[in-house]
Amino acid sequence: MAVLELAIFLTVASLIYNASTSGHDAAPTKLYAGPFVRVGGTLIAYRSWGTHGRPIVLLSGFIEPSWVWNDVGRILGRTHRVYALDLPPFGFSERRGPYTLAHWTQLVEGFETALGIDRPLLVGHSLGAAVAVLAAVESPQRTSGIVLLDGDALPGGGGPGFLTDLLVPPWYTSAYRLVTGFDWIFRRGLRDAWGSGPPPFTNAFVDAWQEPFRVSGTAAAFRSMLGRGVPGVSTGTLARVAVPRLVVWGSEDHVDSVAAGRRTAELLHARFVEIPGAGHLSMLAAPAAVAHAIQPRAG
Protein backbone atom coordinates (compact mmCIF):
# COMPACT_ATOMS: atom_id res chain seq x y z
CA MET A 1 0.00 0.00 0.00
CA ALA A 2 2.83 2.37 0.84
CA VAL A 3 4.46 1.76 -2.54
CA LEU A 4 1.14 2.27 -4.30
CA GLU A 5 0.50 5.51 -2.43
CA LEU A 6 3.99 6.75 -3.29
CA ALA A 7 3.47 5.91 -6.96
CA ILE A 8 0.14 7.76 -7.00
CA PHE A 9 1.68 10.78 -5.25
CA LEU A 10 4.61 10.92 -7.70
CA THR A 11 2.30 10.55 -10.68
CA VAL A 12 0.03 13.39 -9.53
CA ALA A 13 3.04 15.58 -8.70
CA SER A 14 4.53 14.85 -12.13
CA LEU A 15 1.30 15.71 -13.91
CA ILE A 16 1.08 19.03 -12.06
CA TYR A 17 4.74 19.85 -12.72
CA ASN A 18 4.49 18.92 -16.40
CA ALA A 19 1.40 21.10 -16.83
CA SER A 20 3.12 24.06 -15.16
CA THR A 21 6.14 23.72 -17.48
CA SER A 22 4.22 22.93 -20.66
CA GLY A 23 5.73 25.92 -22.47
CA HIS A 24 9.22 24.54 -21.95
CA ASP A 25 9.72 23.19 -25.51
CA ALA A 26 9.87 25.13 -28.76
CA ALA A 27 10.59 24.58 -32.44
CA PRO A 28 14.31 24.78 -33.34
CA THR A 29 13.70 27.84 -35.52
CA LYS A 30 12.35 29.66 -32.44
CA LEU A 31 15.51 28.95 -30.44
CA TYR A 32 18.18 29.39 -33.11
CA ALA A 33 18.21 32.06 -35.83
CA GLY A 34 20.00 29.81 -38.31
CA PRO A 35 21.33 29.03 -40.79
CA PHE A 36 19.43 25.82 -41.52
CA VAL A 37 19.42 23.46 -44.49
CA ARG A 38 16.97 20.64 -45.20
CA VAL A 39 18.66 17.28 -45.68
CA GLY A 40 16.59 14.19 -46.47
CA GLY A 41 13.52 15.73 -44.87
CA THR A 42 15.34 16.85 -41.71
CA LEU A 43 15.99 20.51 -40.93
CA ILE A 44 19.70 20.67 -40.03
CA ALA A 45 21.15 23.60 -38.07
CA TYR A 46 24.73 24.57 -38.83
CA ARG A 47 27.36 27.29 -38.55
CA SER A 48 30.06 28.35 -40.99
CA TRP A 49 33.25 30.39 -41.10
CA GLY A 50 35.53 31.51 -43.93
CA THR A 51 34.91 32.17 -47.61
CA HIS A 52 37.80 30.47 -49.38
CA GLY A 53 40.20 27.54 -49.14
CA ARG A 54 39.67 23.81 -48.84
CA PRO A 55 36.54 22.80 -46.89
CA ILE A 56 36.46 21.37 -43.37
CA VAL A 57 33.36 19.82 -41.77
CA LEU A 58 33.28 19.67 -37.97
CA LEU A 59 31.15 16.98 -36.28
CA SER A 60 30.19 17.38 -32.63
CA GLY A 61 29.82 14.66 -30.02
CA PHE A 62 27.09 13.48 -27.67
CA ILE A 63 24.78 16.35 -26.52
CA GLU A 64 27.18 18.89 -28.08
CA PRO A 65 25.73 21.80 -30.08
CA SER A 66 27.75 23.11 -33.02
CA TRP A 67 28.61 26.36 -31.20
CA VAL A 68 31.33 24.45 -29.32
CA TRP A 69 33.40 24.89 -32.50
CA ASN A 70 33.08 28.71 -32.58
CA ASP A 71 36.68 29.48 -31.62
CA VAL A 72 38.23 26.68 -33.68
CA GLY A 73 36.00 27.61 -36.61
CA ARG A 74 37.06 31.25 -36.54
CA ILE A 75 40.74 30.30 -36.55
CA LEU A 76 40.44 27.73 -39.34
CA GLY A 77 38.10 30.07 -41.24
CA ARG A 78 40.99 32.44 -41.95
CA THR A 79 42.28 30.03 -44.58
CA HIS A 80 39.47 27.49 -45.10
CA ARG A 81 35.73 27.18 -45.59
CA VAL A 82 34.56 25.63 -42.34
CA TYR A 83 31.18 24.13 -41.44
CA ALA A 84 29.84 22.65 -38.20
CA LEU A 85 26.47 20.90 -38.11
CA ASP A 86 24.18 19.74 -35.33
CA LEU A 87 23.62 15.98 -35.53
CA PRO A 88 20.08 15.32 -34.23
CA PRO A 89 18.93 14.98 -31.51
CA PHE A 90 21.68 17.38 -30.40
CA GLY A 91 21.99 21.11 -30.94
CA PHE A 92 19.22 22.87 -32.84
CA SER A 93 18.50 20.44 -35.67
CA GLU A 94 15.01 19.01 -36.06
CA ARG A 95 14.36 15.92 -33.91
CA ARG A 96 13.80 13.36 -36.63
CA GLY A 97 15.33 9.90 -36.28
CA PRO A 98 16.53 7.30 -36.45
CA TYR A 99 19.39 8.31 -34.17
CA THR A 100 21.92 5.84 -35.47
CA LEU A 101 25.47 5.95 -36.76
CA ALA A 102 24.33 5.00 -40.26
CA HIS A 103 21.70 7.77 -40.37
CA TRP A 104 24.09 10.42 -39.02
CA THR A 105 26.56 9.45 -41.74
CA GLN A 106 23.84 9.84 -44.38
CA LEU A 107 22.96 13.27 -42.99
CA VAL A 108 26.59 14.39 -43.20
CA GLU A 109 26.83 13.28 -46.83
CA GLY A 110 23.50 14.95 -47.62
CA PHE A 111 24.67 18.12 -45.88
CA GLU A 112 27.79 18.22 -48.06
CA THR A 113 25.71 17.74 -51.19
CA ALA A 114 23.17 20.40 -50.22
CA LEU A 115 25.87 23.03 -49.63
CA GLY A 116 28.14 21.97 -52.50
CA ILE A 117 31.00 20.92 -50.20
CA ASP A 118 33.50 18.87 -52.19
CA ARG A 119 35.83 16.37 -50.47
CA PRO A 120 36.12 18.09 -47.09
CA LEU A 121 38.34 17.14 -44.21
CA LEU A 122 36.04 15.55 -41.63
CA VAL A 123 36.83 16.34 -37.99
CA GLY A 124 34.82 14.28 -35.51
CA HIS A 125 34.79 14.98 -31.79
CA SER A 126 33.87 12.19 -29.35
CA LEU A 127 30.77 10.50 -30.84
CA GLY A 128 31.42 12.45 -34.05
CA ALA A 129 34.66 10.49 -34.49
CA ALA A 130 32.68 7.32 -35.29
CA VAL A 131 30.62 9.25 -37.86
CA ALA A 132 33.81 10.49 -39.53
CA VAL A 133 35.26 6.97 -39.64
CA LEU A 134 32.14 5.40 -41.10
CA ALA A 135 31.86 8.14 -43.73
CA ALA A 136 35.51 7.61 -44.72
CA VAL A 137 35.07 3.83 -45.01
CA GLU A 138 31.75 3.88 -46.88
CA SER A 139 32.56 6.78 -49.25
CA PRO A 140 36.33 7.41 -49.26
CA GLN A 141 36.03 9.41 -52.48
CA ARG A 142 33.94 12.02 -50.66
CA THR A 143 36.58 13.07 -48.10
CA SER A 144 40.16 14.30 -48.22
CA GLY A 145 40.88 12.87 -44.77
CA ILE A 146 39.66 12.53 -41.19
CA VAL A 147 40.70 13.83 -37.79
CA LEU A 148 39.46 12.10 -34.64
CA LEU A 149 39.36 14.52 -31.71
CA ASP A 150 38.92 12.99 -28.24
CA GLY A 151 36.96 10.11 -29.73
CA ASP A 152 38.16 6.54 -30.24
CA ALA A 153 35.19 5.79 -32.58
CA LEU A 154 34.44 2.54 -30.70
CA PRO A 155 31.10 1.67 -29.04
CA GLY A 156 30.56 2.71 -25.41
CA GLY A 157 28.54 0.92 -22.76
CA GLY A 158 24.97 1.95 -22.07
CA GLY A 159 22.62 1.70 -19.12
CA PRO A 160 20.33 -1.24 -18.50
CA GLY A 161 17.64 -1.67 -21.12
CA PHE A 162 14.86 -1.83 -18.53
CA LEU A 163 15.26 1.92 -17.95
CA THR A 164 13.09 2.56 -20.99
CA ASP A 165 10.30 0.56 -19.33
CA LEU A 166 10.59 2.31 -15.96
CA LEU A 167 10.88 5.87 -17.22
CA VAL A 168 7.36 6.25 -18.55
CA PRO A 169 5.26 9.40 -18.84
CA PRO A 170 4.61 11.43 -16.82
CA TRP A 171 7.63 10.54 -14.63
CA TYR A 172 10.14 10.62 -17.46
CA THR A 173 8.99 14.03 -18.69
CA SER A 174 9.35 15.49 -15.19
CA ALA A 175 12.76 13.92 -14.64
CA TYR A 176 13.99 15.13 -18.03
CA ARG A 177 12.91 18.73 -17.43
CA LEU A 178 14.33 18.79 -13.91
CA VAL A 179 17.71 17.35 -14.92
CA THR A 180 18.18 19.46 -18.05
CA GLY A 181 17.25 22.61 -16.15
CA PHE A 182 19.57 21.98 -13.20
CA ASP A 183 22.69 24.17 -13.55
CA TRP A 184 24.72 22.16 -11.03
CA ILE A 185 24.57 19.01 -13.16
CA PHE A 186 25.89 20.85 -16.21
CA ARG A 187 28.60 22.63 -14.25
CA ARG A 188 29.77 19.34 -12.73
CA GLY A 189 29.81 17.52 -16.06
CA LEU A 190 31.59 20.36 -17.85
CA ARG A 191 34.15 20.66 -15.06
CA ASP A 192 34.98 16.96 -15.37
CA ALA A 193 35.40 17.29 -19.14
CA TRP A 194 37.38 20.54 -19.17
CA GLY A 195 40.96 19.76 -18.20
CA SER A 196 43.45 21.60 -16.02
CA GLY A 197 42.71 25.19 -17.09
CA PRO A 198 40.15 27.53 -15.48
CA PRO A 199 36.74 26.93 -17.11
CA PRO A 200 34.58 29.94 -18.13
CA PHE A 201 31.44 28.67 -16.44
CA THR A 202 29.41 31.87 -16.53
CA ASN A 203 25.62 31.67 -16.38
CA ALA A 204 25.48 32.46 -20.10
CA PHE A 205 27.89 29.60 -20.86
CA VAL A 206 25.79 27.09 -18.92
CA ASP A 207 22.56 28.45 -20.46
CA ALA A 208 24.02 27.87 -23.94
CA TRP A 209 24.45 24.17 -23.08
CA GLN A 210 20.94 23.89 -21.69
CA GLU A 211 19.07 25.70 -24.47
CA PRO A 212 19.13 22.87 -27.09
CA PHE A 213 17.33 20.58 -24.63
CA ARG A 214 14.27 22.78 -25.14
CA VAL A 215 13.94 21.83 -28.82
CA SER A 216 10.63 20.04 -29.35
CA GLY A 217 10.99 16.27 -29.39
CA THR A 218 14.30 16.12 -27.51
CA ALA A 219 12.92 14.29 -24.48
CA ALA A 220 11.35 11.59 -26.66
CA ALA A 221 14.53 11.30 -28.71
CA PHE A 222 16.69 10.76 -25.63
CA ARG A 223 14.25 8.22 -24.27
CA SER A 224 14.56 6.23 -27.50
CA MET A 225 18.34 6.16 -27.04
CA LEU A 226 18.33 5.02 -23.40
CA GLY A 227 20.10 1.75 -22.72
CA ARG A 228 21.75 1.55 -26.15
CA GLY A 229 25.06 3.10 -25.21
CA VAL A 230 27.24 5.31 -27.39
CA PRO A 231 27.34 3.93 -30.94
CA GLY A 232 30.65 3.24 -32.62
CA VAL A 233 32.40 1.17 -35.26
CA SER A 234 34.31 -2.09 -34.92
CA THR A 235 38.08 -2.39 -34.78
CA GLY A 236 37.83 -4.08 -38.18
CA THR A 237 36.17 -0.97 -39.60
CA LEU A 238 38.96 1.20 -38.19
CA ALA A 239 41.50 -0.99 -39.97
CA ARG A 240 39.71 -0.35 -43.29
CA VAL A 241 40.19 3.44 -43.24
CA ALA A 242 42.31 4.28 -46.26
CA VAL A 243 42.12 8.09 -46.35
CA PRO A 244 44.68 10.30 -44.55
CA ARG A 245 43.95 10.28 -40.79
CA LEU A 246 45.07 11.86 -37.56
CA VAL A 247 44.11 11.38 -33.90
CA VAL A 248 44.19 14.41 -31.57
CA TRP A 249 43.59 14.14 -27.82
CA GLY A 250 43.47 16.31 -24.73
CA SER A 251 46.19 15.16 -22.33
CA GLU A 252 43.78 15.58 -19.38
CA ASP A 253 40.83 13.79 -20.98
CA HIS A 254 39.17 11.65 -18.30
CA VAL A 255 36.00 10.97 -20.30
CA ASP A 256 37.80 9.04 -23.04
CA SER A 257 41.26 8.10 -21.83
CA VAL A 258 44.48 9.00 -23.60
CA ALA A 259 45.21 5.27 -23.71
CA ALA A 260 42.01 4.72 -25.73
CA GLY A 261 43.11 7.41 -28.16
CA ARG A 262 46.52 5.85 -28.61
CA ARG A 263 44.94 2.46 -29.23
CA THR A 264 42.71 3.88 -31.98
CA ALA A 265 45.70 5.67 -33.51
CA GLU A 266 47.54 2.35 -33.63
CA LEU A 267 44.57 0.62 -35.27
CA LEU A 268 44.38 3.41 -37.83
CA HIS A 269 48.17 3.56 -38.29
CA ALA A 270 47.75 7.28 -37.66
CA ARG A 271 49.84 9.95 -35.98
CA PHE A 272 48.78 10.80 -32.42
CA VAL A 273 48.89 14.40 -31.13
CA GLU A 274 48.29 15.41 -27.51
CA ILE A 275 46.92 18.82 -26.53
CA PRO A 276 48.60 19.70 -23.20
CA GLY A 277 46.25 20.56 -20.33
CA ALA A 278 43.05 20.03 -22.32
CA GLY A 279 40.33 17.63 -21.25
CA HIS A 280 37.58 16.02 -23.31
CA LEU A 281 36.29 19.40 -24.50
CA SER A 282 39.63 20.27 -26.03
CA MET A 283 38.11 22.47 -28.76
CA LEU A 284 36.80 24.76 -26.01
CA ALA A 285 39.71 24.53 -23.57
CA ALA A 286 42.50 24.88 -26.17
CA PRO A 287 41.01 26.06 -29.50
CA ALA A 288 44.28 27.45 -30.91
CA ALA A 289 46.15 24.19 -30.27
CA VAL A 290 43.32 22.11 -31.75
CA ALA A 291 43.13 24.32 -34.85
CA HIS A 292 46.92 24.12 -35.22
CA ALA A 293 46.77 20.31 -35.12
CA ILE A 294 43.95 20.18 -37.70
CA GLN A 295 45.32 22.76 -40.16
CA PRO A 296 48.12 20.73 -41.79
CA ARG A 297 45.65 17.95 -42.60
CA ALA A 298 43.31 20.44 -44.27
CA GLY A 299 46.04 21.56 -46.65
Image: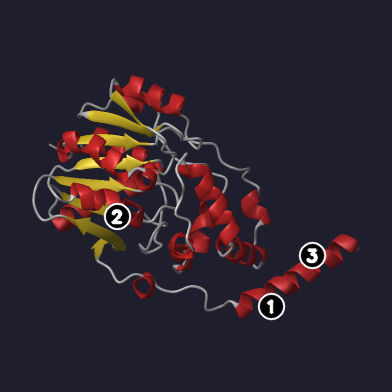
Identified by mark 1, the residue type is Ile
Tag 1, which secondary structure?
Answer: helix
Identified by mark 3, the residue type is Ala
Which residue is the site of mark 3? 7
Q: CA distance from mark 2 to mark 1?
A: 39 Å
Residue 16: mark in rendering: 1
Q: Residue at x 52, y 79 (%)?
A: 23
Residue 243: mark in rendering: none
Q: Nearer the viewer, mark 2 or mark 3?
A: 2
Q: Nearer the viewer, mark 2 or mark 1?
A: 2
Residue 146 at x, y = what percent? Answer: 25, 35
Which residue is the site of mark 2? 70
Q: Residues within 10 Å of mark 1 (few under 14, many from 20)?
A: some
Q: Which mark is first along the chain, 3 or 2?
A: 3
Q: Which mark is first along the chain, 1 or 2?
A: 1
Q: Residue at x 61, y 45 (%)?
A: 161
Q: Residue at x 52, y 62 (%)?
A: 220
Q: Is residue 248 toward the left or the right of residue 259 in the image?
A: left
Q: Compared with residue 211, is residue 279 higher up or lower down, i.e. above or below?
A: above
Residue 251 at x, y = what percent? Answer: 42, 31
Q: Is residue 9 toward the left or the right of residue 39 in the image?
A: right
- Quarter residue 12 falls in: bottom right
Residue 60 at x, y = what percent? Answer: 35, 48
